[in-house]
Image: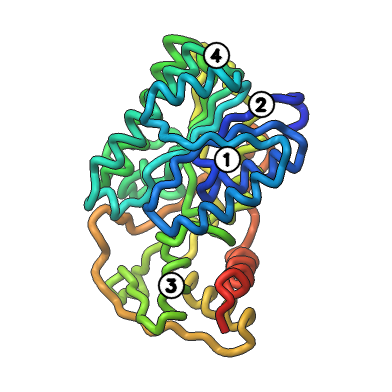
Amino acid sequence: MSITSIGEKTYLITGSAGFIGFYLSSDLLKKGHKVIGIDNINDYYEVKLKHDRLAQLKEYDNFLFLEGDISDKDFILDSFIKTKPNVVINLAAQAGVRYSIENPDAYIQSNINGFFNILEACRNYPVDHLLYASSSSVYGANKKVPFEETDFVDNPVSLYAATKKSNELMAHTYSHLYKIPATGLRFFTVYGPMGRPDMAYFGFANKYFTGEPVKIFNNGDFENDLYRDFTYIDDIVEGIERLISNPPTDSVPHKVYNIGNNSPVKLMTFITTLEKALSNSLGREVEFEKIFEPIKPGDVPATYASTERLQEAVGFKPKTSIEEGLQKFADWYVDYYNVK
């Protein structure tokens, strides 16, 4: 199934200077589609990385960038009026579980008010399909694995998770009231080159090259280590693109899908694989100095995606191994930061 099957359309992607937004925009642009990118270039993490992503997107003639915040309703409505998007993919959000404890206001402003503005714009200026980022965090501390989209998700353990669950409820309501075809994307621990520096794997690399120990929040308990369903960025993009051309057609046209690797690994396994990948990139042995600390509030012991619904809908499940994905990240990191 190809995205080109839905014809030449205009895609509005919020968070286009972000990790997933950049890769999705880039792939759509390569395929000749018109992309309208929106981002506020906030300083939650290294702004240079966002500008570097954006610079690559601006090399395409079929890319238009609008700098602004989705929490600014007038800006969003004006953007819809001017660009008349056919498909909207809302990836703009205040990310991070731990940061939601430090700065909850940012999450309400972006993830709740901002998403409300996107829904209002889609109501007033109808689109063929609205896709939006949810998160595996909606599953909270569910002990039943793998996580299925039909599981009970009313016990979030962080404000970030609560805002993402709220997005799903808001989208369902607007789909019910205004027949907006909407699809929620529950992403599972996305990683890869040009990723988010606030993510653990990126932070581990940063600390190694600055001579600092890495903090591992598992109490040093290797038997009951944290498990994560790490999903490589290319698999995330393919999953989104396949779903774009499959808008829900039910009486309430709203669905949610897991996009995860369906193959969780222990955090310590992930770390040793990253050490090996950096060793390969540098041509010398890399071993992190490690400090073990208790699990942080809002963190969950395991994430594990069922991908059956995604496979049934679009015939795809993520497939990139952590060995392959982390090697690509390590090669990029060593080159981008020119480390030795």
Q: Which residue is mark 4?
A: 126
Q: Nearer the viewer, mark 4 or mark 2?
A: 2
Q: Residues within 10 Å of mark 1 (few under 14, many from 20)?
A: some
Q: As shown in the figure, which amino acid type bears the numbered disc 2? A: Thr
* Real-space Cα separation, disc 1 to disc 4, in angstroms: 30 Å
Judging depth in this view, the residue of 213 and 298 nearest the camera is 213
Quarter the C terminus occupies: bottom right
- In the rendered image, residue 308, in percent from the top left (x then y), is placed at 57, 40
- In the rendered image, residue 324, in percent from the top left (x then y), is placed at 65, 66
The answer to the question of whether label 1 and label 4 lie on touching residues, with beta carbons closer than 8 A, is no
Q: Report the number of numbered marks.
A: 4
Residue 13: quadrant of the picture: top right
Q: As shown in the figure, which amino acid type bears the numbered disc 3? A: Phe
Q: As shown in the figure, which amino acid type bears the numbered disc 4? A: Pro
- Identify whether 37 is placed above or below 193: above
- In the rendered image, residue 321, in percent from the top left (x then y), is placed at 62, 63
Q: As shown in the figure, which amino acid type bears the numbered disc 1? A: Glu
Q: Which residue is mark 1?
A: 308
Q: Earlier in the sequence, mark 2 or mark 1?
A: 2
